[in-house]
């Protein structure tokens, strides 16, 4: 029969091939599921993977939407990946994303209806600070009181959600909104709007920031001392100590970067695609970004591809519901399969399959 | 300046695409954007029943589509745009939080008709809003609740603090109090429409505090299931929830959207669709009740039905003065009833309710 033998070093070839293999396996399993649901399987796969990009009818709209959906995922995932590489587990990006949006929106709305060019950049900075400060809570609790940052950062998501609800129904509520919750629409106020840089390209400031961040992360990891320290701390904490890495400073730095980037993502979302602070402004980007980070192998380029792929399954999934009447649950199952196969075939990167010939 | 003109051009181009699409196909295409799953057994189920009623009424002349579990905000806007781009003529967006997205997309597709449930913004000629006078149903079940409670404690699971929900709480409280002056109402806010775990926990917490009749303004059957387990009574919301609690279920307020959806689809086919704001109640059948439980004593049932009939006939308004606000100031004088405008924006509790509207 078969047996698994651990490789001395992970296979380079397989680490590139496994994502492709996983996508192929997902398509096969997905096709089986769709046909069991009584839907044409090939048409379903085409609607999910090909139509959003190549459809003549609506491709011009859905292509940019891929960037809009992937932008925040990539931005957050890049921040998380630095910490994850160093063994610092920030699970609370969703909360940092919310706080970034609240801080930035509040700073802007305090000046409403003033029109000035500096309002949006100021909101961007405050939004970044909001996420950063929220991430500092689990970071400082870990460095000074040795608490577990996984738990603290996760639980702070729920605190942030409560603050969001209080803000949407209280302090930030639109005074002209007839008593309904939700802030003024920031994407409609010229001074605060996060516009597309080129019309209908989907390239709003958040997407641009995401791509710049990818480049910075790449350079940081491959060229900079901090990047070396991050990798070392993750692979061998003892060796890192000898190399002069200060573990506390590393926790603060990694959590700060992740929180700041998540805060930026929230700010760009609330001033652009979402438009306003509402009771359910957050739609899970902070959690999905964790998946994107791992799907992308914690590598900046991998994260870009993973973010775009996740965005594609979301947008294609909606289309499949719309065009073929597939239930939403089947789309979520399909996304789940993709992650399952990715992790499952990962075994090939680290292990070799051996055929055992009979009894010895 | 330059950017604005580019944007305007792009919008115009999009609008043109929309127009070509609207003429390019024969069947009338009707799309639905749902906030929950179609099997939620409440709010979304009833909207989906309305969709199925359109299919039944028009057969091959109409094609309907839907996307379920669409988050409010950017995702909703994308789904609506995709619908407009794929040749839909009429789009129903069935959650309050779709208000801004609906208006944003409507601006880009002037030839597509949009119908937004429970909102108040009609910024463009092709946006209509519609809602039901759920508070009429709340008055009737409030009366039943006041009579049925033995502990004199009624629980209310509220969703999002918008006027529609606050109005429902007030209507239920006023009529429970009238039926039973000893009654106390405990309110729990879940800040969401669709969270079975939270709603179930809320129901459990209420029952632990001595509540024996539960009302809900949320979409899942979780509170009904909890009430059934605990031996309490409960009222279903939006759809007939009797299956979830055969003995707990007293009745449900049913939102019957089917006649309205059929009427609006017909208007699109005939080319007579116009913007309007609909707010119908028991009288047109938009608000209905599920079968009343045998557990309700005959005299209470007779009173409830009399109230329902009086509301339907326009003889009784659930908000008839004297009613004071929570702070003791006068809301309505003796015999006075509110105008629809201010009633639609009701943002305060009436006198006697403990707690604050979440701010």
Image: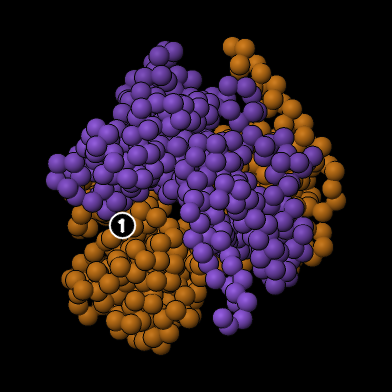
Chain colours: A purple, B orange
Q: Nearer the viewer, residue B266 or A79?
A: A79
Q: Quadrant of residue B38?
A: bottom right
CA neighbours of label 1 inside 10 A, class few (<14), some (14 to 19), many (20+): some
Q: Please identify the quarter of the rendering in which residue B128 is found.
A: top right
Residue B118: x and y, percent?
50, 50
Question: Quick one: quadrant of the C terminus of chain B?
Answer: top left
Which residue is painted at 62% across and 56% down in the image? Answer: A22
Please determine whether, in this image, residue B122 is positioned above or below residue A26. above
Task: Indicate left or right for B240 with B111 as reference.
Answer: left
Q: What residue is shown at x 25% (from left), y 69% (from top)?
A: B206
SS at mark 1 in the image: strand
Image check: A307 left or right of A231?
right
Quarter placement of the N terminus of chain B: top right
Q: Which residue was labeled with disc 1?
A: B189
User: Within the image, what quadrant is residue A112 found in?
Assistant: top left
Q: Is residue B194 above or below residue B332?
A: below
| Viewer-side residue, A242 vs B359 | A242
Can residue B136 be spotted in the picture? no
Front-most of A149 and A230? A230
Residue at image position (51%, 51%) is A10
């Amino acid at each position: 029969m078969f047996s698994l033998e651990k490789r001395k070093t992970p296979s380079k070839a397989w680490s590139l091939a496994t994502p492709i293999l996983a996508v192929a396996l997902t398509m096969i399993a997905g096709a089986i599921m769709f046909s069991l649901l009584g839907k044409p399987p090939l048409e379903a796969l085409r609607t999910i993977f090909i139509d959003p990009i190549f459809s003549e009818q609506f491709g011009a709209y859905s292509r940019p939407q891929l960037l809009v959906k992937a932008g925040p995922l990539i931005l957050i995932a890049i921040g998380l990946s630095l910490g994850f590489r160093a063994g610092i587990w920030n699970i609370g990006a969703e909360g940092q994303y919310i706080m970034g949006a609240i801080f930035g929106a509040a700073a802007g709305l305090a000046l409403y209806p003033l029109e000035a060019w500096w309002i949006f950049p100021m909101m961007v900075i405050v939004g970044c600070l909001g996420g950063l400060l929220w991430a500092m809570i689990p970071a400082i609790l870990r460095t000074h009181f040795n608490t577990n940052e996984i738990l603290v950062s996760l639980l702070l998501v729920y605190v942030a959600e409560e603050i969001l609800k209080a803000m949407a129904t209280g302090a930030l509520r639109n005074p002209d909104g007839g008593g309904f919750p939700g802030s003024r629409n920031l994407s409609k106020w010229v001074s605060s709007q996060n516009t597309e840089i080129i019309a209908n390209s989907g390239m709003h400031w958040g997407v641009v920031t995401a791509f710049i961040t990818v480049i910075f992360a790449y350079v940081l990891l491959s060229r900079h001392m901090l990047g070396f320290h991050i990798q070392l701390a993750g692979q061998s904490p003892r060796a890192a100590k000898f190399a002069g890495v200060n573990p506390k400073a590393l926790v603060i730095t990694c959590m700060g970067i992740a929180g700041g980037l998540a805060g930026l993502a929230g700010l760009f979302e609330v001033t652009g695609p979402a438009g306003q602070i509402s009771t359910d402004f957050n739609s899970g980007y902070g959690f999905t970004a964790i998946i994107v980070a791992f799907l992308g192998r914690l590598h900046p380029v991998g994260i870009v591809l993973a973010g775009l792929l996740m965005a594609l399954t979301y947008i294609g999934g909606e289309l499949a519901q719309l065009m073929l009447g597939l239930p939403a649950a089947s789309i979520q199952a399909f996304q789940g399969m993709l992650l399952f196969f990715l992790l499952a075939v990962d075994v090939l990167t680290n292990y070799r399959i051996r055929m055992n010939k009979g009894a010895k | 300046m330059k950017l604005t003109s580019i944007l305007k051009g792009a919008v115009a181009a999009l609008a043109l695409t929309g127009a070509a699409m609207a003429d390019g196909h024969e069947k009338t295409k009707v799309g639905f954007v749902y906030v929950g799953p179609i099997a939620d057994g409440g709010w979304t189920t009833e909207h989906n029943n309305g969709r199925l009623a359109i299919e039944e009424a028009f057969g091959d002349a109409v094609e309907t589509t839907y996307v379920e579990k669409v988050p409010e905000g950017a995702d909703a806007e994308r789904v609506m745009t995709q619908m407009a781009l794929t040749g839909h003529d009429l789009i129903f967006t069935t959650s309050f939080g779709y208000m801004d997205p609906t208006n944003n997309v409507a601006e880009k597709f002037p030839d597509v008709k949009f119908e937004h449930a429970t909102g108040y913004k009609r910024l463009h000629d092709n946006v209509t809003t519609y809602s039901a006078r759920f508070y009429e149903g709340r008055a009737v079940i409030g009366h039943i609740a006041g009579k049925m409670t033995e502990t004199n404690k009624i629980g209310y699971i509220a969703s999002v603090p918008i006027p529609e929900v606050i109005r429902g709480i007030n209507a239920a409280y006023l009529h429970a109090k009238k039926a039973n002056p000893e009654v106390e109402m405990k309110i729990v806010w879940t800040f969401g429409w669709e969270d079975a775990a939270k709603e179930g926990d809320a129901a459990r917490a209420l029952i632990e505090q001595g509540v024996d009749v539960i009302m809900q303004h949320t979409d899942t059957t979780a509170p009904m299931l909890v009430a059934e387990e605990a031996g309490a009574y409960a009222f279903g919301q939006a759809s007939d929830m009797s299956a979830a609690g055969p003995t707990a279920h007293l009745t449900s307020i049913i939102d019957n959207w089917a006649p309205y959806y059929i009427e609006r689809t017909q208007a699109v086919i005939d080319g007579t669709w116009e913007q309007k704001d609909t707010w119908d109640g028991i009288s047109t059948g938009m608000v209905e009740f599920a079968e009343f439980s045998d557990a309700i004593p005959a005299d209470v049932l007779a009173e409830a039905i009399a109230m329902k009939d009086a509301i339907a006939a326009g003889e009784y308004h659930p908000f008839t003065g004297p009613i004071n606000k929570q702070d003791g100031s006068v809301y309505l004088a003796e015999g006075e009833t509110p105008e629809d405008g201010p009633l639609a924006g009701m943002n305060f509790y009436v006198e006697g309710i403990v707690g604050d509207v979440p701010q």
